[in-house]
Amino acid sequence: MKSKNTSPGIQIQHYITKKIKSFCFLRLTLYICIVVYAIIVSCPNKDNKNKTG
């Protein structure tokens, strides 16, 4: 790694941007999981209601 040549300020900035990107990615995946879970949970209920009633 050539991070020794860069100044500490740039290293901190890269570290912060990495953290922000990973946090946004985590939130995005969490949101997608919630949406997919909601779709999976709601779809069988609709099918059951249509079949029974």
Image: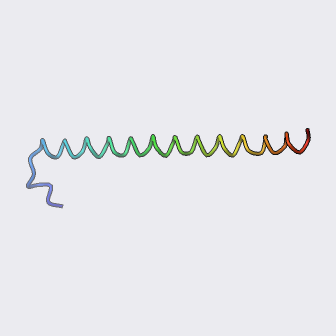
Looking at this view, name the residue that lies furthest to the right. 52
Q: Position of residue 4 (x, y in %)?
A: 11, 55
Looking at the rendered image, the quarter that the N terminus falls into is bottom left
Q: Residue at x 39, y 42 (%)?
A: 24
Looking at this view, name the residue that lies furthest to the bottom. 1
Q: Residue at x 52, y 40 (%)?
A: 31
Side of 35 relative to 6 (left or right) = right
Figure quadrant of residue 41:
top right
Give the number of callouts: 0
Q: Nearer the viewer, residue 40 or 1?
A: 40
Q: Position of residue 6 (x, y in %)?
A: 10, 51
In the figure, 35 relative to 3: above or below? Answer: above
Q: Nearer the viewer, residue 23 or 51?
A: 51
Q: How is the image coloured?
A: rainbow
Looking at the rendered image, the quarter that the C terminus falls into is top right
Q: Position of residue 34 (x, y in %)?
A: 58, 40
Side of 23 relative to 37 (left or right) = left
Q: Residue at x 89, y 45 (%)?
A: 51
Q: Position of residue 11 (x, y in %)?
A: 17, 46
In the figure, 2 relative to 48: above or below? Answer: below
Side of 7 relative to 12 (left or right) = left
